[in-house]
Amino acid sequence: MIRDIIGYVLGLVIFIIGIPFVMYLASGSPDLVQISLIQWFLLILLAIIGIGLSIWSIVYMKNVGKGNPFDAFNHEVAPRTSSLMTDGPYGICRNPMLLGVFIYHIGVLIALLSFGALLVFIIEVLIMNVQVKKEEQRLKMDFGKQYEDYMKRVNRFMPNV
């Protein structure tokens, strides 16, 4: 239970608060009143969609996968899933939590309209891609052919439509 809570809190601090704050700082800490109404609208819309997808994925992972999402470069921070999830949000893409985070961070990018924020986002995507590739190696070991078949059917980040 404690390890679950640690995983959720770390995810909140890093992805929902931390990275957007770093994007804001990398943008030169602009005055938030300079952000247009349409930028605010898009940020809020993309935050709702992205964070909603991430929460749906976390709840699904807890209920169906019997685990927690926070696994850092093959170091188990919180209990890992015990069953492979291929339906629900995991039928959309193999990493719907990250897709949700990326959608939210694109909203932050739109609000900030800065090269610094874009650079932070690109670095985040590159780092998370390395993390996901390491995680995929572990999942292949844990679930074998079942995971390999899933990889053939469902994209890493881009939604299957």
Image: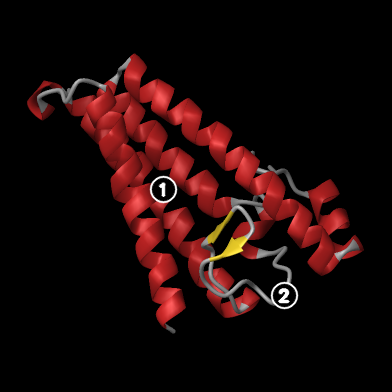
105 relative to 26, above or below: below
Q: Look at mark 1 in the image and give the residue it sits on.
A: 49
Tell me if 49 is positioned left or right of 57 in this view.
left
Say which element carries label 2. loop
Closest to the observer: 63 or 30? 30
Check disc 1 and give the amino acid type: Ile
Counting from the top left corner in percent of width and height, residue 2 is at: 40, 81
Counting from the top left corner in percent of width and height, residue 83 is at: 72, 75
150 relative to 132, above or below: below
- Outermost front residue: 75
Q: Look at mark 2 in the image and give the residue it sits on.
A: 83
| Quarter assignment of residue 72 | bottom right
- Total numbered circles: 2
Q: Badges 1 and 2: C-beta atoms under 8 Å apart?
A: no
Counting from the top left corner in percent of width and height, residue 101 is at: 45, 46
Residue drawn at (30%, 19%) of the image = 113
Q: Is residue 137 visible?
A: yes
Say which element carries label 1. helix
Disc 1 crowd, CA 10 A, few/some/many (<14, 14-19, 20+): some
139 relative to 123, above or below: below
Closest to the observer: 126 or 101? 126
114 relative to 72, above or below: above
The quadrant the N terminus occupies is bottom left
